[in-house]
Image (spheres, helix red, strand yellow):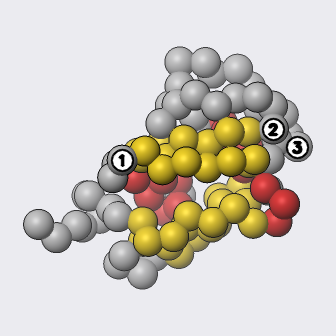
């Protein structure tokens, strides 16, 4: 089954600028960068403690074929970011 915007599939997740940006590319060609602060603020985790303005991404782990988990410099490492959520953040 082919993926679409309703079922986005990333081909690249790259942390850049010393952890300040996440570079995303999707199979349909959409490329975007999301600031670490914005990504942290959009955490789907139950732990919604506010992110510091200087938060950075220190690790990214893909979870199966459906999501990514980020570890941030403020210690936050819970919450799975689905490909659909990452696509929404990339478009907004």
59 left or right of 64? right
Q: Nearer the viewer, mark 3 or mark 2?
A: 2
Q: Earlier in the sequence, mark 1 or mark 3?
A: 3
Res 88 visible: no
Q: Earlier in the sequence, mark 3 or mark 2?
A: 3
The picture places residue 53, in percent across and down from the top left corner, at 85, 40
* Point 76% across, 28% down: residue: 75
The picture places residue 27, in percent across and down from the top left corner, at 36, 76
**Closer to the camera in the image, 89 or 73:** 73
Pick the quarter of the image with the N terminus: bottom left
Labels 3 and 2 touching (C-beta < 8 A): yes
CA neighbours of label 3 inside 10 A, class few (<14), some (14 to 19), many (20+)? few
81 shown above or below 34:
above
Outermost residue, right side: 54
55 shown above or below 7:
above
Q: Earlier in the sequence, mark 2 or mark 1?
A: 1
* Point 42% across, 81% down: residue: 29
**Closer to the camera in the image, 34 or 57:** 57
* Point 35% across, 64% down: residue: 9
Q: What element does badge 3 sit on? A: loop
**Closer to the camera in the image, 1 or 91:** 1
The picture places residue 70, in percent across and down from the top left corner, at 62, 42
CA neighbours of label 2 inside 10 A, class few (<14), some (14 to 19), many (20+)? some
Q: What element does badge 2 sit on? A: loop
- Marks 1 and 3, how far apart at CA: 29 Å
Labels 1 and 3 touching (C-beta < 8 A): no
Tag on residue 35?
none
* Point 36% across, 47% down: residue: 64
**Residue topped by disc 1:** 64
**Residue topped by disc 3:** 54
**Residue topped by disc 2:** 73
2 shown above or below 29:
above
């Amino acid at each position: 089954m082919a993926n679409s915007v309703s079922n986005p599939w990333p081909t690249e997740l790259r942390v850049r600028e010393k952890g300040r940006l996440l570079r995303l590319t999707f199979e349909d060609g959409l490329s975007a960068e999301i600031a670490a602060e914005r990504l942290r603020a959009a955490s789907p985790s139950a732990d919604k403690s506010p992110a510091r303005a200087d938060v950075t991404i220190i690790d990214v782990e893909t979870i199966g074929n459906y999501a990514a988990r980020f570890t941030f410099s403020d210690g936050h490492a819970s919450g799975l970011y689905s490909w659909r959520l990452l696509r929404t953040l990339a478009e907004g």
